[in-house]
Amino acid sequence: MATKSTISEVSNHVGQEVTIGSWVNNKRSSGKIQFLQLRDGTGYIQAVVVKSEVSEEAWEAAKSLTQESSLYITGLVREEARSQSGFELTVTGIEIIQVAVDYPITPKEHGVDYLMDHRHLWIRSPRQRAVLIIRAQIIRAVQKFFDDRGFRLVDPPILTPSSCEGTTELFHTKYFDEDAFLTQSGQLYMEAAAMALGKVYSFGPTFRAEKSKTRRHLIEFWMIEPEMAFTDLEESLVVQEQFVSYVIQYVVANCRKELETLERDIPKLEAIQAPFPRITYDEAIVFLNENGFEIPWGEDFGAPHETAIAEKYEKPVFITHYPTKIKAFYMKPDPNRPEVVLCADMIAPEGYGEIIGGSQRIDDPELMEERFKEHELSTDAYQWYMDLRKYGTVPHAGFGLGLERTVAWICGLDHVRETIPFPRLLNRLYP
Ligand code: 4AD
Ligand code: MG
């Protein structure tokens, strides 16, 4: 019996016979030799079947293989400098598991809707595989960054009785006899956790019933939400720029092959190092109005505004101190200028838009009460949140990084639909 191996581990078996569970990616033949392009999830390898060196049975088996057929391939591992993986298999045996008939995704071009309908198969393709690997490495980098810096991972609930980011984008459901919502953000609970553990972060799915059909919006997306006690906006910005630089450099160091598969401009990523530039909302308004936009003070920015601002920089840029009126109820007003809040959005370069939203939080109980009234939020549902201001309130700040927009930026993808295994989009719940 040959040793069982994976494609990623064949380098440990040069000169030996191995068996690899695999799928057929592609095949070509030149009369007396068949070349099988195989994949097993860990990598790609070419297996060479020479008619004169295998049994009649194995030769016929190879001939019957189609795209995405599954098999155990047995062969001798050889170093092969000309191949992409550096190795090749000289086949000695083939055990077919299943011959796949009419695999729906062929090497020809397919439309996006067709591919999205076949997302469960599309993820087998080299580009999609590279994206999913990078996504997994980003998650690893995120956890490493915070774990190594004294932050504790805390999981906020997904079913909640109240909203965090405004009431218009909530998914409603029943919680037995009560009304409940799918969480838009774990932030409010993370504030409670910060008062218990100091520095915390969460990583989980969030939901927005937003009727937006843009290349940056998902209905279900994953967010990383750190929250820090005894921390002001300025200190939070330093954490954010170090965090994002760390994640980018981790991916560059660990995913070079995948970035190359995606034809990503790697030097552009290598240039992402803290500190990041900062401009105030006021400065951004002046810049936009001097550069072809007509936007009055007090209006929120859309994607074109963000892109115009980001184009001035090679690195992400912080836009700080937005008008109080257009931001969430929990943001702390600037003590010197209460018409703006101590907040910042981080806008990624190359047109990828806002990847982080964050702020210092209101810590004064009376002001918090006022805000609840202004925003018509029922104080009953938020009583526990008020308690955080009543029992030992402290200055605190936090932020939320959208995972999928970060994956889109790092991978250089033009749409977030390819950044998550099974995207939930406006009008798409299948597969
Ligand atoms: O700016 P947002 O709405 O901020 C919050 O939810 C805060 N409570 C976070 C906090 O301070 N703890 O969302 C944060 C980030 C955005 O910058 C964006 O990257 C991402 O989440 N995001 C989305 N990503 C994909 N699809 C959507 N519909 C998104 N909405 C927000
Ligand atoms: Mg935001």
Image (cartoon, rainbow, N blue to C red):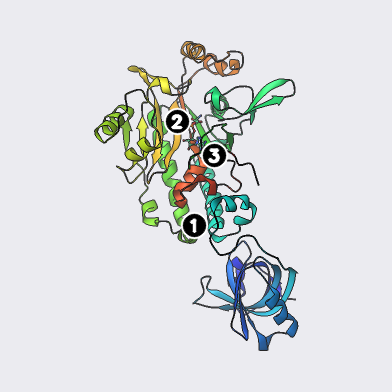
Pick whichever of labels 1 and 3 is earlier in the sequence. 3
Secondary structure beneath dot 2 equals strand
- Check mark 1 vs ligand 1: CB closer than 8 Å? yes or no: no
Q: Residue 122 vs residue 312: left or right?
A: right
Identified by mark 3, the residue type is Leu
Of the image marks 2 and 1, the number of the one nearer the N terminus: 1
Badge 1 vs badge 3, beta-carbon distance below 8 Å:
no
- Most foreground residue, 431 or 274: 431
Q: Secondary structure at mark 3?
A: loop
Q: Nearer the viewer, residue 330 or 324?
A: 324
Q: Quadrant of residue 76?
A: bottom right
> How many residues crowd mark 1 within 10 Å: few (<14), some (14–19), many (20+)?
some
Distance from mark 3 CB to nearest ligand 1 atom below 8 Å: yes
How many residues crowd mark 2 within 10 Å: few (<14), some (14–19), many (20+)?
Answer: many
Q: Looking at numbered disc 2 in the image, what kind of residue is underneath it?
A: Gly
Residue holding disc 1: 255
Quadrant (top left/top right/bottom left/bottom right) for the N terminus = bottom right
Q: Can you tell which of label 3 and label 2 is closer to the viewer?
A: 3
Q: Report, in whole angstroms, how far the alpha carbon at label 2 lies from the one at label 1.
A: 28 Å
Q: Position of residue 278 (x, y in %)?
A: 32, 35
Q: Is residue 148 visible?
A: no
Residue that label 2 marks = 358
Position of 17 relative to 255 (above/below): below
Rendered image: mark on residue 218: 3
Looking at the picture, which amino acid does disc 1 mark?
Cys
Residue 168 locus on image (x, y percent): 54, 24
N-terminal label among 3 and 2: 3
Some atom of ligand 1 lies within 8 Å of the CB belonging to the residue at label 2: yes
Name which residue lies at 46% across and 59% down: 256
Left or right relative to 232: residue 4? right
Of residues 403 and 270, the one drawn nearer to the viewer in this rendering? 403
Question: Which residue is outermost to the bottom?
Answer: 52
